[in-house]
Image (cartoon, rainbow, N blue to C red):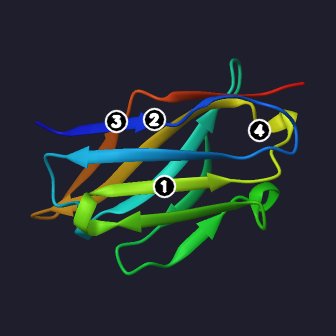
Amino acid sequence: QVQLVESGGGLVQPGGSLKLSCLASGFTFSSYAMSWYRQVPGKERELVASIMSAGTTNYLDSVKDRFIISRDNAKSSVYLQMNNLKPEDTAVYYCNGLGRVWGTRRDYWGQGTQVTVSS
């Protein structure tokens, strides 16, 4: 059974930091690209950061130099360190795993964790 379980969300003041964690199980984590997405009500889900199996990273322009994505294959976990948070970072953050098994695309999602940036 595939599971992605996020944790680490919460309420933080502008300028503060949070670290999100995502624990994966049920698939070969090390061979999957892992990403963090976020969504606010009424808007489409957007890609925040990705890390490939080889470690290459990509970021949404608005979070570059503030957020850092990392992974620990031994722990089947992916992380998002969020610094200098802004009110516009408020959203539900979702962990995503993307890979292929015998040529078939596999796309897994967590349940999401709320991040609220407010004074």
- x and y percent of residue 49 in the render? 59, 58
Q: Nearer the viewer, mark 4 or mark 2?
A: 2
Residue linked to disc 1: 79
SS state under label 3: strand
- x and y percent of residue 110 in the render? 37, 34
Q: Is residue 27 above or below residue 30?
A: above
SS state under label 1: strand
Q: Earlier in the sequence, mark 4 or mark 1?
A: 1
- The Cα–Cα distance between marks 3 and 2, rounded to whole angstroms, is 7 Å
At 41% from the left edge and 65% from the top edge, which residue is drawn? 71
Q: Earlier in the sequence, mark 1 or mark 3?
A: 3
Residue linked to disc 2: 7
Q: Is residue 57 above or below residue 95?
A: below
Which numbered dot is residue 45?
A: none
- The Cα–Cα distance between marks 2 and 1, rounded to whole angstroms, is 10 Å
Which numbered dot is residue 5?
A: 3
Residue linked to disc 4: 89
Q: Are marks 3 and 2 in contact (CB under 8 Å)?
A: yes
Disc 1 residue type (three-letter): Tyr
- The Cα–Cα distance between marks 3 and 4, rounded to whole angstroms, is 20 Å
Q: Are marks 3 and 4 in contact (CB under 8 Å)?
A: no
At 15% from the left edge and 53% from the top edge, which residue is drawn? 27
SS state under label 4: helix
